[in-house]
Image: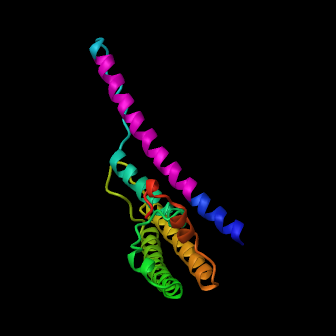
Amino acid sequence: MRRALDLIYASALVASALGLVSIAALVFFQIAGRILDRVILATGGEALGLQVPSLAEIGGFLFVGAAFLALPATLRAAGHVRVTILAKVLPGAAARALTVLVLAAAFGLAAFATWHSWLQALDSWQFNSVSFGMVRIPLWLPQGAMTLGLAIFALALLDELVTALSGRTPAFVAAEGAKTIDEGGH
C-alpha cells in the first residue's frame, strides 16, 4: 500500500511539473514569435503574427492545476507552512495528540473542499461552461485538475493521520526533523 500511495503522490508531482513546463514552453513560444516578427519587420518582411491565443488564461489554468497537484508531495516533504512552536514545547504525547488533531481537521477541510470542487466541475461539465477567452476552454478541465489535486491532498492527509494514529512518525514530521538550520529548519 505504501508504494501505491507514494506512486500516486509522485505522479501528481510529475503532472504538476509538466504543467509548469507547459507554461514555460507556451511563454517561450510567444516571446520567440514576437522576436521573430520584429526581426522580419526590421528586414523589410511581413510579420508572421505567431502567438498563443488566450495565453494568460491557459497559463492560469495550468498554474492552478500545477499548484493543487503539488500539494500532496509538498505536505510529505514538510514544504507547507506549519507553526511548530507549540508542538515543540509540549511533551511527546501532547505533541502527537496535537498533530493528530491538526491532521484530522486538515483532512476534514480538504475533503470538504474536494467535494465542493467536484460539484463545481460537474456543474460546469453538465452545463458546458467555457472560459471567456479567445480559446473557449471547458471549465471542467481546470476544475477537474484542481479537484484531483485536492483529492490526492486529502488522501495524503488521511495517510499521515493514519500514520500518526498508529504511533509512527508522519512523513512531514520526519522531513521537518531532517532539515538543518541552513535548509530553513529550526
Please state the horizontal and vertical placement of residue 159, each as a whole percent of the image: 60, 76
Work out whether residue 7 or residue 29 is closer to the camera in this orientation and state it.
7
Residue 46 appears in the figure: no
Q: Is residue 32 magenta?
A: yes
What residue is rendered at 33% in x and 48% in y? Answer: 56
Q: Quadrant of the C terminus?
A: bottom left
Residue that sits furthest to the top in the current view: 43
Q: Is residue 183 magenta?
A: no
What residue is rendered at 51% in x and 55% in y? Answer: 16
| Image quadrant in which you'd find residue 13 | bottom right
By secondary structure, the bulk of the magenta-drawn segment is best described as: helix
What residue is rendered at 44% in x and 58% in y? Answer: 181
| Image quadrant in which you'd find residue 112 | bottom left
Q: How many marks?
A: 0
Q: How is the image coloured?
A: rainbow
Please state the horizontal and vertical placement of residue 151, each as a whole percent of the image: 53, 72
Work out whether residue 44 or residue 20 is closer to the camera in this orientation and state it.
20
Please state the horizontal and vertical placement of residue 55, each as a whole percent of the image: 36, 45
What segment is highlighted magenta in the picture? 13-41
| Image quadrant in which you'd find residue 90 | bottom left
37 vs 151, left or right, is left
Q: Quadrant of the N terminus?
A: bottom right
Work out whether residue 83 or residue 35 is closer to the camera in this orientation and state it.
83
Residue 94 appears in the figure: yes
What residue is rendered at 71% in x and 66% in y? Answer: 3
